[in-house]
Amino acid sequence: MANRLLLIDHQSEDAKALQQSFSKQQWHVQLATSLEQAYDILRKDSYEPHVIIADLGLPDNAILKHLDELQTLAEYAEWIFLHQDATTTQQEHLHDFAFDLINYPLDLARLNIITKRALRTSLLSRIAGNYSGKEQSKYQPASFFGTSEAAQQLRQLIEQLSSVPISALTITGETGTGKGLVARILHHCGQRKNGPLVELNCAALPKDLLESQLFGHEAGSFTGATKKLKGLFEQADGGTLFLDEIGDMDIELQAKLLKAIEDQKVRRLGSEKEVDIDVQIFAATSVDLEQAINEQVFREDLYHRISVFTIALPSLSQRKDDLVELVPRIIAEFNEKANKKVSEISDSSWEKLLAYHWPGNVRELRNVLERCVLLSTDEQLPDQWLQLNHEVHEHSTTTAVSEHQLVIPIDGTIALEQVEKLMLEKALELEEGNVTAAAKRLQISRETMRYRMKKFDLSSG
Ligand SMILES: Nc1ncnc2c1ncn2[C@@H]1O[C@H](COP(=O)(O)OP(=O)(O)OP(=O)(O)O)[C@@H](O)[C@H]1O
Ligand SMILES: [Mg+2]
């Protein structure tokens, strides 16, 4: 479909010339010579333009007076304003949402370039808009599977929490128990679902980098800060900031974080100015924060601030009943992804699945089932690929030589490509999703690791 452009201009001569010029460049152009007409096009015809070029010189400042309404009618449009002599105050006001402001006399070449750029931005925000719609349906309370009492209560709690405003909340649980999943469900079902969800893994970055990521910085505020950076607090404005592995955050930085949460303000590094922020904070941790407080690596005041609401996720071994729902659902997901048709699980496989104690929780379960589905040749879940070694896992992992190994049959059942994927998965599993460490294990660079993970659609956690 052609790209749609709406021109709002009452000087019919100029407007006609613009209309012709853009039509020649494959734009579908609608022309409104008054505000009423613009409303009609946007409302009655649901025109949904990608770009709107509007002359500010309409009688009675009409455009400026009705900006808000116009904006809601054209959700994904980028605005370019043409003006003769807009005052500085008007310009400042417009800069908040205009893609650009262009002075008369018009430089047509420049207008063309800017219109093309505006189109790209509009297309992107449409994709992002659709994407976030999909995300919302993917993350419902029901996306947290499980029939156990614990899982049912959890879904209820998630539903309750979605209907109240939350300023901070903590999710605890062992690795792979679904902390990230619960955070996403809460965001997408909660009061801020239309705002951004910004995630940061506090364990993944050194202190200084974490600080500048969180608070942002001005250009030149420290060596290496060549450009200014908007911090994640600011990026999450109106939405949620999800701080994963908060227990690993440096204690000095914890003080700054607490202050930002309490004052609802942040200051970029190297800047004097404070910026107001309105974010809800979700924190996740797999370490026991109370113990961390005793060991003086976690601030008690921050703990009290973020744990007003706490969701504690049980480990999979405490709710093995849930396997009955989890296993078929996960198998169905991988069947679809890999175009397989696994639909039978032997009694002996079930026994093994139920007997195993799942130290890596649901993530480990997913990995095991993915491997089995990928290597399946018919409807049967291949029992030999479960490889749930109780001896190894139930005792100390340090002596577990075979945990670091992968058994690969060269009997025609497995392709070379799959071996690569299995190795990547195993390395990531052993390093608990730490990409750098996993890359080291495989003797490849971090970039190569990232590239290959992308290729196989693997995530680090
Ligand atoms: N109850 C559940 N129902 C469906 N999927 C689940 C459930 N719990 C976890 N998962 C899935 O298991 C995987 C691991 O979960 P997640 O990443 O949320 O764990 P986590 O607690 O954040 O782990 P980590 O501490 O290692 O970051 C994800 O793919 C998630 O969607
Ligand atoms: Mg996680």
Image (cartoon, helix red, strand yellow):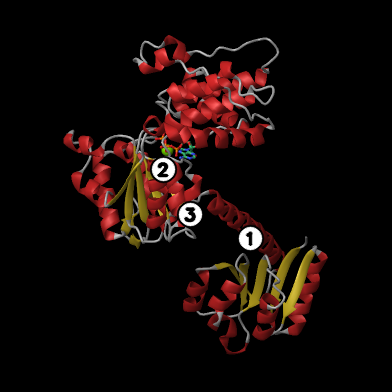
- The residue identified by callout 1 is 122
What separation in Å lies between label 3 and label 1 (alpha carbons)? Answer: 23 Å
Q: Which mark is residue 151?
A: 2
- The residue identified by callout 3 is 188
Mark toward the viewer: 2 or 1: 2
Verify CB contact (< 8 Å) between mark 3 and mark 1. Answer: no
**Which residue is at the front of the view, 316 or 363?**
316
The furthest residue to the bottom: 60
Q: In this view, does 282 lie to the left or right of 404?
A: left
* Dot 3 amino acid type: His
Q: Which residue is drawn at 39% across and 29% down?
A: 317
Q: Which residue is drawn at 68% across and 16% down?
A: 413
What separation in Å lies between label 2 and label 1 (alpha carbons)? Answer: 41 Å
Q: Is mark 2 on a helix, strand or loop?
A: helix
Verify CB contact (< 8 Å) between mark 2 and mark 1. Answer: no
What is the x, y in percent for residue 106? 68, 73
| Picture quadrant of ligand 2 | top left
**Which residue is at the front of the view, 66 or 126?**
126
What separation in Å lies between label 2 and label 3 (alpha carbons)? Answer: 19 Å
In the rendered image, which quarter contains the N terminus?
A: bottom right
Mark 2 CB in 8 Å range of ligand 1? Answer: yes
* Dot 2 amino acid type: Ala
